[in-house]
Amino acid sequence: MAIQLHDTLTGQKHELTTLVPGEVGLYVCGPTVYDYSHLGHARCYVVWDVVVRHLRARGYRVKYVRNFTDVDDKIIARANQRGEDPLALAARFADAFHEDLDALGCLRPDIEPRVSDHIPEIVALIELLVQKGFAYAPGNGDVYFAVRKFPEYGKLSRRNLDDLRSGARVERGEAKLDPLDFALWKGAKPGEPRWPSPWGEGRPGWHIECSAMSKKHLGDTFDLHSGGKDLVFPHHTNEIAQSVCACGDALHADQYARQWLHNGFVGIDDEKMSKSLGNFFTIRQVLEKFDAEGLRFFLLGTHYRRDFNFSDLVLGEAELRLGYLYETLEKADRLSAGAAPAANDTLLERCREALDDDFGTPQVLGLLAEAFTAANALCDLKGKRSPGQQASLAAFAAAARTVGETMGLLGRPPRAALLALRGKAAARRGIDGAAVEAKLAERTEARRAKDFARSDAIRDELLTGGVAIMDSPEGTTWKVAG
């Protein structure tokens, strides 16, 4: 089955075809680094991480480029508030972004360009647009792109130029010929970083940055461009306009990125996440309470193009489901130890087909749930497993881990994962792990003394406190009751 992708530009699903057979050039719009990354960033970059993993698992050589915007109005404003150099502030939050995404199991991009390192390329691209008549310098240090000179402007966002113009206005200090025109270069102002240019000292506008960086690292035309759907307009719309006009042979929107992918929003308790509503959560705030892999598991439970709702309750439920998977893996490993896996690629192929169909991660999690339920039933049979059953469990565990590698899940040793998940859940419930262990030791002594009434009373006491006990031939363990 060929990989099918939903293209925002056409609004339809298409088979993935690449400029160079077997190779994919992917540009992902990275963060503007002026603060810690939030849940929306987590959703976005976990999604594109799975896309890269799956393409590579399918044999493609992927060149994954994701930028840092480290020159921007928000960065400058935040730095001036704090009396800090804007580039230093951006570098600090870029490091924090790496820490957060590393925790979520995201692969680092092959190339991670920063705006501040690409000023010559940005200036050269603007010069080309001015030379070709698509941009103009009004003489105040700014340079603007002339939107109406690109006939397909708004195709990606399905917006009409006249409708856009009705809500547009020229801000004080701007010298636009048309309210829709946007800045490619901004003349220097006090307290802002600046670089030399043919139009005087200044800094780039936001949109031209990604055009210049993608051109340098992927070429004038490349295969896939992705990001959050909030970027469709104006950012990606403007990227298309300036890139096609600078580099295209004909002025068609698909001469820049051949296909566009956009992920949906994250809502918080049925409201859109925003600082103004006070429901804005950073990744590290969430990871103080919840397991990082549990958060990744939760984020992949909704198709990437859909909006979805976040709450502590549903994330806690996701952690429980992930714990069940690790419990089953631990049993399968133990019961199949030393067995050669049986030949069974059904789970692997069905999951790959789900990802081939526009990266259907919820379908993959559903297929895993079915496979883990069947494996768990086999693990829980009475008596010793037959050689055939052991081989089946070994095959299941191998396939589950292969699927998990593509999803960025199930990579930890099961016991370590279960202890980590238990620790987070216990902390949220105010359960003292040391006190539980002391009670379990007391219960073990009661059982040795054949005081089963006391043993049962301790079990009931712990369960009332939110702790479930599991007895097995290997000993007694505990977990936070769901």
Image (cartoon, grey):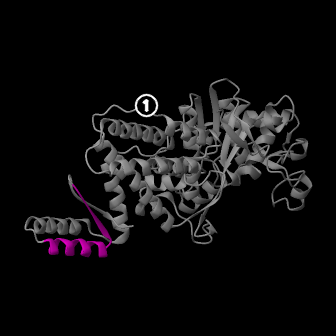
User: Which quadrant would residue 38 be assigned to in this image?
Assistant: bottom right
**Amino acid type at image mark 1:** Ala
Query: What residue is drawn where x is 68% and y is 38%?
Result: 4
- Taking the view exactly as shown, the residue that stands out farthest to the top is 21
In the depicted view, which residue is nearer to us: 46 or 240?
Answer: 46
Q: Residue at x 83, y 36 (%)?
A: 245
Q: Toward which corner of the image does residue 468 lie, by quadrant? A: bottom left
In reply to whether residue 482 is colored magenta, the answer given is: no
- Image coordinates for residue 458, horizontal then vertical, percent: 20, 73
* Quarter of the image where the N terminus is located: top right
> Does the image show residue 164?
yes
Q: Extreme left residue here?
A: 449
Give the magenta-colored segment's residue range. 452-472
The x and y percentages for residue 90 are 55, 50
Q: Main secondary structure of the magenta part?
A: helix
Residue beneath disc 1: 343
**Left or right position of 45 against 259:** left
> Where does residue 448 sit, x and y in percent of width and height?
9, 64
Q: SS class of the residue under badge 1?
A: loop
- Compare residues 141 and 328 and report the one nearer the observer: 328
Q: Is residue 470 magenta?
A: yes
Is 66 placed above or below 444 here? above
Badge 1: few (under 14), some or many (20 or more) residues near its Cα, within 10 Å?
few
Residue at position x 37%, y 45% from top?
412
The reply to whether residue 66 is visible in this rendering is: no
